[in-house]
Amino acid sequence: MADVNTPPTVTLAPPHRNSIGRFLLWFLPGILAALAIARVSVSIQDRFAPLIVLPICVGAAVACVSYGLMHLAGFRSFWPAVIGTMLLGLIAAAGEHAFFYFDFRAEYLRQIENKPQLAATGFCPPSIKEYFVRQSQVDSKTLWLWTSHAILLVAAAGAMTGWLVRRADRSTASSAQ
């Protein structure tokens, strides 16, 4: 006969069965969030673009949103969370460059509309590859700035996620005692 004071046992599914689903439930919306953060970052870089502070802030924003999505999805694995968030940071960094190009292209097309003589000659904006090649040739420091910006953003996203996950693990462990 079972003891009345003993709580019922609950059998959980093996972690590998549901972990891919939880990962995707976190990571796919995380891609959209990273791109939204990148768009906001590009829109404020005209007014606020400190060399070190902005990528760290963007990385921290990616980490916080990513952690919130992880919590909603029930995804708790430390290293996949950190590496996945670093990938989201890389997506945000690439997204920033893509949004810079889209803004450049939109402005380019507006100027062509204002000057019909350019439109008549078949003048068109450069491709994304041509745009980045031209931008990198303007100043020798451009590639270094792009790279350091991405590295800082990704590192901040990974470090912040690691800190948030460890902090949550510690608070869960202390509340269980």
Image: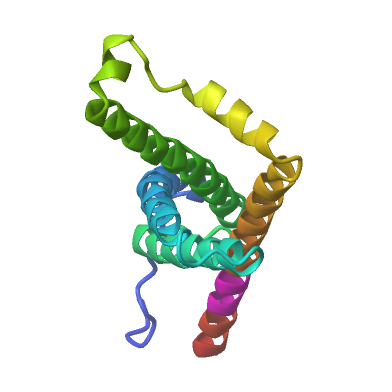
Q: Which is nearer the eye, 50 or 176?
A: 50
Q: Quadrant of residue 85?
A: bottom right
Quadrant in which the N terminus appears: bottom left
Quadrant in which the C terminus appears: bottom right
* Residue at the extreme top: 121
Q: Which is nearer the eye, 4 or 75?
A: 75
Residue 143 placement (x, y as % from top left): 71, 40
Could you tell whether 139 is left or right of 154 in the image? right
Q: Is residue 164 above or below residue 73?
A: below
Residue 71 placement (x, y as % from top left): 40, 65
Based on the picture, tell me whether residue 166 belongs to the magenta stretch.
yes
Q: Is residue 58 above or below residue 104?
A: below
The residue segment tinted magenta is 163-169
Could you tell whether 7 is left or right of 92 in the image? left
Residue 73 placement (x, y as % from top left): 36, 57
Residue 163 placement (x, y as % from top left): 62, 73
| Residue at x 36%, y 32% (from the top left corner) | 108
Can residue 20 be seen here? The reply is: no
Could you tell whether 48 is left or right of 78 in the image? left
| Residue at x 56%, y 56% (from the top left corner) | 81
Based on the picture, tell me whether residue 174 belongs to the magenta stretch.
no
Can residue 175 be seen here? The reply is: yes
| Residue at x 50%, y 88% (from the top left corner) | 175
Q: Which is nearer the eye, 176 or 85?
A: 85
Q: Is residue 109 above or below residue 85?
A: above
